[in-house]
């Protein structure tokens, strides 16, 4: 408080003191010359009056000057707050003005931080995309060139190489699909298509959809059906279906051969929690916080071999956060993983 007082009134105090000093000296000299005597009482009263009046005038004028100048600058940089300040002029003007300027500066700094962060992300994203696309492209190119170099004449090699090139193209397609999805999510972040739907039914549908995939690795998909009745939620059904698919596909891909994945539902207050548990390879604690990052894979080669773009869980996080809900991952390395999403219950 004391410091603040010193800061805002220090200038006027010093100037008033100087003014008082010089006018008093002049008064004394004039008195001495014209009247040959000095009335000390009068001089003291004069000094006090001069000091007080000049202090008030200087303080007022300086505040007005700074206020007007900064107000104009404020207007010029297009702050929506400038009109607000103009309206309430009074002794607290300077204080509110400096508060507003500080707020304005903070906002601008935050804006710049966000822009920098976005720019960094964009650069990284571009780098990652080209890296991701390069690998399958070179693979496909390699097989095609070998075929053109003569391998095409050998019937057995030809089929094998064409199949491998086909796999590479497939990989390019699902990376592109995931990229498209992410781009879509980012541009229409707020355009969620909320509806009232039955979670139990949606899980059943996704199970049917993934049945073949699970069979290939002999992973049993299990629905913990303590909920034999509908569980209504309020969310974007299509997007949530994508979430279920991404998490369950991972459970199948990174699950044990002949393993299992169990989905269960819990309701807590106005929330519905969907829990996905598998007995797969699990994720090490140091990797766990990173699995939702774009292009992050614990085991690069295994993820590629399983046909992963590294974008699945970041898409999950994106969708769930757009719903203002949460997704969490728990895992015990070598034993299995559990992913949990929360959604808004609907009655
Ligand atoms: N259920 C799971 N069990 C073990 N590891 C998993 C599981 N789900 C995800 N992961 C790990 O997290 C990484 C990121 O997952 P995701 O974003 O879906 O990318 P990917 O395209 O590799 O599947 C995976 O590469 C994998 O290493
Ligand atoms: Mg995945």
Image: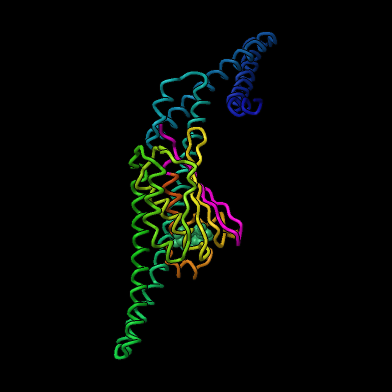
224 sits to left or right of 164: right
Query: Is residue 328 toward the left or the right of residue 81 in the image?
Result: right
Q: Which residue corresponds to the image point at 36% horizontal and 56% vertical from the top-left?
A: 209
Residue that appears at 39% across and 58% down: 210
Instruction: Identify whether 151 is placed above or below 138.
Output: below
- Evaluate whether residue 185 shows in this view: yes
> Does the magenta segment cover residue 345?
yes
Q: Position of residue 219 (x, y in %)?
A: 48, 61
| Along the line of sight, the residue nearer the viewer: 318 or 342 | 342
Q: Which residues are magenta?
A: 322-347
> Where on the picture, by quarter, is residue 248?
bottom left
Foreground of the two, 229 or 164? 229
Ligand 2: which quarter? bottom left
- Residue at image point 50% right, 52% down: 262
Q: Would you place residue 207 above or below residue 199 in this image?
A: below
Horizontally, residue 151 falls left or right of residue 127, namely left
Query: Toward the viewer: 25 or 13?
Result: 13
Model colouring: rainbow
Question: Of 209 and 99, which appears nearest the observer?
Answer: 209
Quarter of the image with the C terminus is: top left
Residue 333: x %, y % from top left? 61, 60
Question: Where's residue 276, x and y in %?
Answer: 50, 51
Residue 40 in percent (x, y) is at 70, 10
Q: How many marks?
A: 0
- Relative to 42, say whether 327 is above or below: below
- Tell me if residue 171 is in the magenta stretch: no
From the image, which quarter does the N terminus lie in?
A: top right
Please identify the dominant SS of the magenta region.
strand
């Amino acid at each position: 408080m004391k410091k603040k007082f010193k800061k805002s009134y220090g200038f006027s105090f010093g100037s008033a003191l100087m003014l008082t000093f010089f006018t008093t000296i002049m008064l004394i000299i004039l008195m001495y010359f014209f009247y040959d005597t000095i009335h000390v009482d009068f001089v003291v009263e004069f000094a006090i009056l001069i000091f007080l009046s000049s202090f008030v005038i200087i303080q007022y004028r300086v505040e007005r000057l700074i206020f007007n100048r900064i107000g104009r600058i404020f207007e010029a940089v297009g702050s929506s707050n400038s009109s607000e300040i103009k309206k309430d002029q009074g002794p607290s003007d300077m204080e509110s003005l400096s508060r507003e300027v500080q707020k304005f500066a903070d906002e601008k700094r935050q804006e710049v931080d966000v822009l920098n962060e976005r720019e960094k992300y964009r650069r990284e994203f571009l780098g990652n995309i080209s890296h991701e696309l390069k690998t399958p492209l070179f693979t496909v190119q390699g097989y095609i060139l070998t075929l053109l170099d003569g391998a095409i004449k050998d019937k057995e090699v030809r089929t094998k190489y064409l199949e491998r090139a086909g796999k590479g193209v497939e990989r390019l397609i699902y990376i592109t699909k995931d990229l498209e999805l992410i781009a879509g999510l980012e541009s229409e972040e707020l355009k969620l298509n909320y509806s009232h739907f039955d979670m139990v039914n949606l899980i059943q549908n996704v199970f049917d959809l993934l049945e073949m995939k699970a069979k290939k690795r002999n992973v049993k998909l299990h629905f913990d059906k303590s909920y034999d009745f509908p569980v209504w939620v309020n969310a974007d059904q299509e997007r949530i279906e994508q979430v279920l698919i991404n998490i369950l596909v991972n459970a199948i891909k990174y699950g044990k051969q002949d393993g299992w994945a169990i989905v269960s539902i819990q309701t807590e207050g106005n929330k519905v929690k969907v829990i996905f548990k598998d007995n797969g390879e699990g994720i090490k604690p140091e990797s766990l916080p990173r699995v939702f990052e774009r292009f992050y894979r614990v085991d690069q080669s295994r993820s590629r071999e399983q046909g992963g773009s590294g974008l699945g869980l970041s898409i999950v996080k994106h969708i769930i956060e757009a719903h203002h809900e949460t997704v969490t991952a728990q895992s015990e390395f070598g034993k299995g993983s559990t992913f949990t999403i929360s959604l808004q219950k609907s009655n």
